[in-house]
Image (cartoon, rainbow, N blue to C red):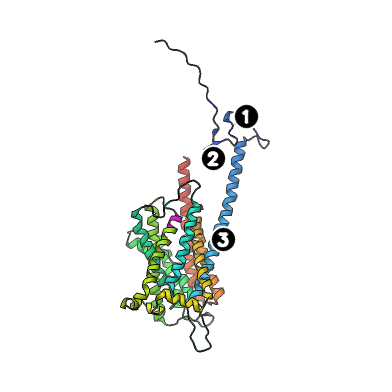
Amino acid sequence: MARTKQPPVRRESSSEYFNKRTASWQTSANGAPVADMKHATTANGGQPPVVVAAAAAAAARNEAGVLQLVISVAGIYASFLTWAYLQEKLTTTPYGPSGDGAAPEKWHFPVFLNTIQSVFAATVGCVYLLLSTPRGAAVPPVIPSRRILGPLALVAVTSSLASPFGYASLAHIDYITFLLAKSCKLLPVMFLHITVFRRRYPLYKYLVVTAVTAGVAVFTLHSGRRGGGGGSKHKAPSSSSNVAWGLLLLSINLLFDGLTNSTQDYIFQAFRPYSGPQMMCANNIMSTLVTGLYLVASPYLVSTGLGDWLGMDVAGSAGELGAALDFMRRYPSVWKDVLGFAACGAVGQVFIFYTLSTFSSVLLVTVTVTRKMFTMILSVVAFGHRLTHMQWLGVGLVFGGIGVEAGIARREKLAKEAANKAKKDS
């Protein structure tokens, strides 16, 4: 069979080209073929217009990154510093007249406070989830599968149980000790990973935990020695048995915090791609259900032996919900602090998840450590705490250990990112 010669096929010039500087395929700015773009030059160095456009876009992204960084850091500082200030104000400020023989009252309704905050956070989280979803894409479900219900319920229960123990400890220890111990979340997380998950850590982490534990111990042992400059506007308990009980309650709080954080890490790893906004919505919705159920059932539990053993009688026979509403009816100014506390906590969670999604966990660790230091300084200045030299030594040990751990984690993270980038380039 005779072959016929086919006419030559004319290839159309592509509007895409491979940029060696960015190692990626790019499209010309005006859609012109690359063959034509090769001959197009600019007055500035003879570069093709598309290269100039790409450079301008990169510069714009860098400027946006700096702006996003400033917004993220400022948002975390502003929301959580205000949140911590309102928390200490609520838990330490006496309300009511003290000159007519009646003893002033203090706020002791932690579950009610957590319920208000979780309602705010669930609402804000749903809005954040909607706004963070790309235009035209379906909004990801808050609970994507039945398998995730168990871990999410565990997070809701542990986070709901942690807070009452923390607030109860404030009746026996001062707020500075509370802040210092709450900065040591590495200790319960490591304890759970070592005992439950059989995980091993490098030597420096054990040294950091030792330094942090020693710092808390030094600070606590000298918390009762108020002579020569130590003191506070709010009277601190001096009984060693009360302090020991307060530290036990705070240890339970930290243990629940560690279990919450470990379970959240497991959810993010086992149910990919599960995002921060989804976690924020699900966690706060389920926490609202748990604490709301407790508030509804508290009037019935008060009259039982279980309610007496749990110390629920401090809220009165009406239960915590009725007692909290009655307290705010007598002192309407408390509403402002409660709603402000809830709003700051909800907005702060958004900034944390935004920072994690926009930047890296390395930046978040740095911001978190410095934020805790500023929180302690704010507490000392705003509420008149005066620390002894040994207490400042304890503070230095705690934040020194945390700072070293954050610095090493940052270096390891940057090295890992550089190695992954080099592997992709090769």
| Residue 306 left/right relative to 120 | left
Q: Amino acid at mark 3?
A: Ala
Query: Quadrant of the rendered structure where residue 32 is?
Result: top right
| Residue 7 left/right relative to 191 | right
Q: Residues within 10 Å of mark 3 (few under 14, many from 20)?
A: few
Residue corresponding to mark 2: 22
Measuring from the top left, give residue 17's x and y in whole percent: 54, 33
Q: Which residues are magenta?
A: 275-279
Q: Main secondary structure of the magenta part?
A: helix
Q: CA distance from mark 2 to mark 3?
A: 32 Å
Q: Amino acid at mark 2?
A: Thr
Q: CA distance from mark 1 to mark 2?
A: 21 Å
> Judging from the image, what secondary structure is the residue with disc 1 in?
loop
Measuring from the top left, give residue 352's x and y in whole percent: 49, 59
Locate the N terminus by quadrant. top left
Q: Residues within 10 Å of mark 1 (few under 14, many from 20)?
A: few
- Comparing 347 with 243, the one in front is 347
Residue corresponding to mark 1: 39
Q: Which mark is residue 74?
A: 3
Q: Residue at x 53, y 67 (%)?
A: 81
